[in-house]
Image (cartoon, rainbow, N blue to C red):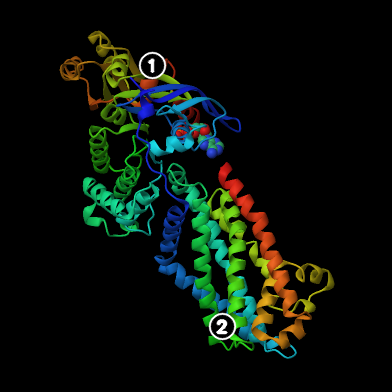
């Protein structure tokens, strides 16, 4: 298998901060890689490095076989970047934005026009194509930004937190758009803070923190290590928290976590359907506020994979 | 090495990319009517204050105050539009437009070239508006049309020179607000020049600075070219003196700030 991204020992410092601290990562062609990590983990720095926008302090980074330092121009011809903020021009229409990027990607006028039209159709923006982007919603801007990164027909698409700040519906629409691209053979490297996003879109997930890789694997491999979904029970009275925990311990799922302060007990389960039934039976008679079955949060994944919480969590605790 | 066969896309020429970037920059100005109207009204108010409030207190030999003032007002308009230019450059950096451009296969310098082109065109438009307002409040040309056009051309050149200073500010500022704040430094500089009052009326130590700083040369060359002999007499030098001084300053500013802006852009 040929490698699309090959990073060895990348380091990048900003003053005292080590944004990348010996990061190793390989991505094969034909894959969708999700870089998952909390705020400040170094995701944006890595994506910008792949896009030839960061001067690395150390390490070797090859994209599509080209060294980002020596062959930056060649790398730029195969990648496209949709950054953390939608870089579309509010004072231009959707169509004008796309035609501009297409022209800048080396297309002539006719071909820029047709590729802009086809991107607008594909992302369901045809109706608003000739309105100023100023009037677009956040979700529409994101889609347009994604579209703008496609008009040059890149081999590798870089998406930095593509759905952060979007409402749930726009988020799903954007996921669909990304999946469709992948179906057409574009490789994607995306960053996210959401486990479900990585799970939904990626064939490989790389978890990073403090500029280093913490864990990597396919979503199902990682889930096995983390343990499927989480059942969380919210007790009405504090005295019941321990009783619930005890009942769950007997079911022998996984490690049971107690949080007396919020009166919550959680446990990770493999086969969510039947185990939820068992769990409910086990706590029958205890007054409950709420029971939920959910994806593990990023902090729970970190805890399961590394045995220590994320930096974010530490911070939260220190503050609260 | 399977990827060595990876299709290498096209590269875009400097001309096309510069024009595309300039077009975007101009559309951004043109499609923000609030900005245009506010800017014009502000300018006009500023002019009216000087013309009718201070104008009465200032009398000059051989030349009316409005004819003295307007060259100052028109010339310094390129500095005031520079504040906007610095802000927009910082915005393009902050909002990811520059990142997108840098990840595209275009010559690196096309961003700066496109900005300089668009802002210079925008300045030229601003100069025409300022001149129009000037005529409306009584400004007249007392030389040849050719000289007046030469003055206008020089103002465009001054705007182009200062553009590099403002691009550098925008690149260094970090945020658009900071860029705007830093660019406001042009205010004291215009007041410490011959733009609104003759340098001769200032205290000696200030005259030493005001008489030699670039804005004074640029304003006075426009005075000499539009007002002819009375202006030459008042300013104490021939038109040729002001032309060469203004051109030297223009070249000097480009020679210093264009390379600095390019360096800063390459670095960041
Ligand atoms: N231009 C910069 N100047 C100073 N510090 C930076 C800069 N870019 C990133 N950092 C720091 O590097 C670390 C990693 O940042 P980043 O890559 O943006 O993380 P993420 O995208 O995962 O949130 C953070 O601590 C951030 O504050
Ligand atoms: Mg980020």
Observer-nearest of A178 and A59: A59
| Label 2 residue SS | helix
Residue B97 against residue B237 in the figure, above or below: above
Give the letter of the chain under mark 1.
Answer: A
Q: Residue furthest right?
A: B204
Residue A319, x across and y down, in percent: 49, 31
Depth check: give the residue in front, A314 or A39. Answer: A39
Q: Which residue is nearer to you in this view: A6 or B130?
A: A6
Work out whether A313 lies above or below B203: above
Q: Could you say where residue B147 lies in the image, as x and y percent from the top left? A: 62, 81
Residue A305 marker: 1
What is the quadrant of residue A50 in the picture? top left
Between residues A158 and A281, which one lies in front from this camera angle?
Answer: A158
Seen at 26% across and 47% down, the residue is A119
**Same subunit, tags 1 and 2:** no
State left or right for residue A111 relative to residue A77: left
Q: Position of residue B210 (x, y in %)?
A: 76, 70
Looking at the picture, does residue B99 appear above or below residue B71? above
Residue A260 showing in the rendered view: no
**Which mark is drawn over residue B227?**
none
Q: Is mark 2 within 8 Å of ligand 1?
A: no
Horizontal side of B164 relative to A260 (left or right) equals: right
Please state, as top left, top right, bottom left or bottom right, where the N terminus of chain A lies in the image: top left
Q: Nearer the viewer, mark 1 or mark 2?
A: 2
Instruction: Say whether residue B219 is visible.
Output: yes
Measure the C-alpha gap from mark 1 to mark 2: 72 Å
Q: Answer with the quarter of the image where residue A28 lies.
A: top left
Relative to B218, is A159 on the left or the right? left
Q: Count residues near mark 1 (Cα–Cα under 10 Å), then give few for <14, some for 14-19, many for 20+.
A: some
Where does label 2 land, which residue? B134
Task: Identify the subunit bearing mark 2.
Answer: B
């Amino acid at each position: 298998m040929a490698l699309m991204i090959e990073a060895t020992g990348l380091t990048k410092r900003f003053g005292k901060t080590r944004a990348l601290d010996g990061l190793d990562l390989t991505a094969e062609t034909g894959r969708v890689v999700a870089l998952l990590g909390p705020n400040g983990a170094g995701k944006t720095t890595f994506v910008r490095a792949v896009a030839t926008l960061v001067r690395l302090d150390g390490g070797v980074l090859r994209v599509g076989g080209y060294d980002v330092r020596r062959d930056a121009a060649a790398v730029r011809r195969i990648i496209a970047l949709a950054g953390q903020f939608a870089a579309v021009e509010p004072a231009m229409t959707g169509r004008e934005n796309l035609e501009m990027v297409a022209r800048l990607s080396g297309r002539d006028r006719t071909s820029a026009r047709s590729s802009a039209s086809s991107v607008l159709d594909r992302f369901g923006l045809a109706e608003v194509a000739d309105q100023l982007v100023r009037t677009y919603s956040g979700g529409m801007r994101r889609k347009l930004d994604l579209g703008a990164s496609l008009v040059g027909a890149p081999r590798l698409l870089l998406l930095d937190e593509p759905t952060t700040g979007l409402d749930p519906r726009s988020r799903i629409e954007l996921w669909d758009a990304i999946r469709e691209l992948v179906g057409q053979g574009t490789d994607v490297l995306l960053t996210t803070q959401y486990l479900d996003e990585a799970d939904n879109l990626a064939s490989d997930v790389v978890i990073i923190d403090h500029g280093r890789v913490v864990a990597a694997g396919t979503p199902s491999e990682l889930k096995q290590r983390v343990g499927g979904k989480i059942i969380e029970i919210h007790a009405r009275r504090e005295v019941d928290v321990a009783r619930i925990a005890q009942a769950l311990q007997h079911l022998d799922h996984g490690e049971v976590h107690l949080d007396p302060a919020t009166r919550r007990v959680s446990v990770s389960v493999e086969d969510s359907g039947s185990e939820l039934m068992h769990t409910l039976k086990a706590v029958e008679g205890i007054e409950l506020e709420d029971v939920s079955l959910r994806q593990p949060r990023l902090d729970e994944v970190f805890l399961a994979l590394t045995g220590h919480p994320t930096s974010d969590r530490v911070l939260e605790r220190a503050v609260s | 090495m399977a990827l060595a066969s990876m299709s290498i896309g096209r590269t875009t020429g400097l001309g096309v990319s510069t024009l595309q970037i300039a077009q975007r920059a101009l559309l951004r100005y043109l499609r923000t009517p609030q900005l245009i109207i506010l800017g014009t009204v502000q300018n006009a108010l500023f002019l009216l204050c000087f013309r009718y409030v201070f104008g009465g207190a200032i009398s000059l030999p051989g030349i009316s105050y409005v004819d003295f003032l307007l060259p100052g007002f028109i010339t310094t308009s390129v500095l005031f539009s520079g504040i906007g230019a610095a802000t927009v450059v910082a915005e393009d950096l902050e909002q990811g437009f520059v990142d997108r451009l840098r990840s595209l296969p275009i010559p690196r310098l096309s961003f700066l070239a496109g900005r300089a082109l668009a802002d210079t065109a925008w300045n030229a438009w601003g100069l025409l508006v300022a001149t129009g307002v000037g005529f409306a409040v009584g400004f007249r040309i007392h030389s040849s049309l050719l000289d007046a056009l030469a003055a206008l051309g020089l103002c465009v050149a001054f705007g182009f020179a200062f553009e590099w200073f403002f691009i550098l500010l925008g690149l260094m500022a970090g945020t658009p607000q900071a860029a705007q704040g830093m660019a406001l430094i042009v205010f004291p500089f215009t007041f410490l020049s011959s733009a609104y009052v003759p340098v001769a009326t200032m205290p000696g130590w200030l005259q030493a600075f005001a008489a030699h700083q670039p804005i004074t040369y640029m304003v006075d060359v426009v005075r000499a070219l539009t007002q002819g002999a009375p202006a030459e007499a008042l300013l104490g030098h021939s038109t040729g003196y002001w032309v060469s001084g203004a051109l030297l300053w223009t070249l000097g500013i480009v020679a210093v700030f264009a390379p600095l802006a390019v360096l800063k852009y390459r670095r960041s």
